[in-house]
Image (cartoon, rainbow, N blue to C red):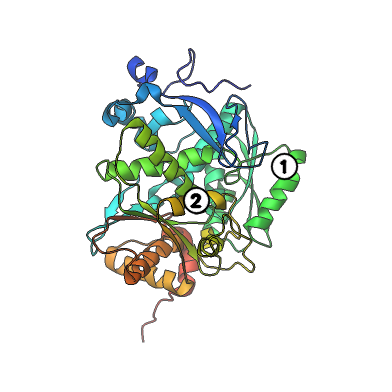
Amino acid sequence: MTRSLALGDPGYQCWPGTSALYTSLMPRIAFLECSRCHQHHDAATPQTVCTACAGALYVRYDLTPAKGLAQRNLIGTAAADRRWSGMRRYASVLPDVEPVTLGEGWTPMLRSNRYPNVWLKEEGANPTGTFKARGLALAVTMARHYGFTKLAAPTAGNAGGALAAYAAAAGIEAHIFMPRDTPLANQVECLAYGAHLNLVDGLISDCGRIVAERKAAEGWFDVSTLKEPYRVEGKKTMGYELVEQLGWEYPDAVFYPTGGGVGLIGMWKAFGEMEELGWVTGKRPKMIAIQAAGCAPVVRAFEQAEPASTIWQDAHTAASGLRVPKPYGDYIILDIVRRSAGTAVAVSDDAIFASLKDWASHEGLLLSPEGAAATAAYDYLLSTGFLTPDDRVVLFNTGSGNKYTDVIGARFRPQHAA
């Protein structure tokens, strides 16, 4: 059974502890909008991609009731509720349905010991150890709301673990397809959470093809990256958080490891919503898309001034989350990078692991290889003059390095005593 997603309607499930005033100010979902052709779709029933052009869909809210209200008032009630100390502090700009939550969000913003204008957003503090918890929390929440009982997704690794965890919490079947050489931690957590794990000889693109071929017959709802609109809604909370944690001011640049790119897309959406609400003013940050040299379709398209990428052949990198031969939302990523006067950077695996070791030994932070791609890219853009040490930047570590112990261990062998 489905219900209308007009937030604030009578009989709707509201966040625990919220006041009548707060509830009356919560924006409504107005419609779903195609990111490519801008056609509107009804949010009252489940949607995947645009029926006209297969573009990814955005959730669009009527923010009128909340405009001009100080951000501390609009998020205050939810933030004061100790049960919602994570990304649910932004419940006012999320779908108003009963959540499936494991405490995701509100991750630390850590200032570098060595670079006074650099902050690292530590997404490894999320449930399942990565930023994927945000998007899958919302995707599974909405899947349960719509009444789905079986979900499926291809994954480079971390999204599979997050889907398995939230599906277990929701009592929903999860069918996960991942490359056979995905880090062991990702495989183990899927099995521990009771998901149906399928290891594939190939890349995430091969996994996606299998899901697409089998989902109709198997009765699966596909929660692949940008194949439904709510993973973006979870990821956008990173944009709200980084602005709030910097005193409701934009940084000069945001460095984001870009495989599927949903986090970058979500943050850009968040910036637009905050500006419409009057919560932040000024120039948006330069958005820096980071990829691995062994799989850099977005970087190549950016450098060649193309509107979308082409499939990267023979994709290879130890940063498994960046091994995406062609992101579904590549056209959105490229548009954001260009509109923000940002750039796209590819870094080698050698540079990734050198930066990983540097940040571990000097900052006490064990980054994921994807996060170390961002720190390596920061060093590179300083050396080229694209940025200066005076620029305030946020680097995203998208996951805990502890989930990559087999991968990192293969690079850093212990020295044996004589």
Q: Is residue 349 left or right of residue 45?
A: left
- Counting from the top left corner in percent of width and height, residue 107 is at 35, 46
Could one spot residue 169 in this view of the protein? Answer: no
Query: Vertically, is 363 above or below 228?
Result: below
Q: Mark 2 — residue?
A: 335
**Quick one: SS at disc 2?**
helix
Which residue of the protein is positioned furthest toward the bottom in this rendering?
418
Q: Is residue 195 left or right of residue 211?
A: left
Quarter of the image with the N terminus is top right
Could one spot residue 340 in this view of the protein? Answer: yes
Q: Which mark is residue 152?
A: none
Residue at 40% across, 35% down: 273
Bin the neighbour count of mark 2 within 10 Å (Cα to Cα): few under 14, some 14-19, many 20 and up: some
Bin the neighbour count of mark 1 within 10 Å (Cα to Cα): few under 14, some 14-19, many 20 and up: some
Q: Is residue 73 left or right of residue 47?
A: left
- Counting from the top left corner in percent of width and height, residue 305 is at 53, 61
- Counting from the top left corner in percent of width and height, residue 130 is at 45, 51
The Cα atoms of the two marked residues, 2 and 1, are separated by 31 Å
**Quick one: SS at disc 1?**
helix
Quarter of the image with the C terminus is bottom left
Which residue of the protein is positioned furthest toward the front in this rendering?
305
Residue at 45% across, 54% down: 338
Residue 33 figure quarter: top right
Residue 367 figure quarter: bottom left
Q: Mark 1 — residue?
A: 215
Q: Amino acid at mark 2?
A: Asp
Query: Vertically, is 97 above or below 233?
Result: above
Which of the two marks, 2 or 1, is nearer to us in this view? 2
Q: Amino acid at mark 1?
A: Lys
Query: Vertically, is 157 above or below 138?
Result: below
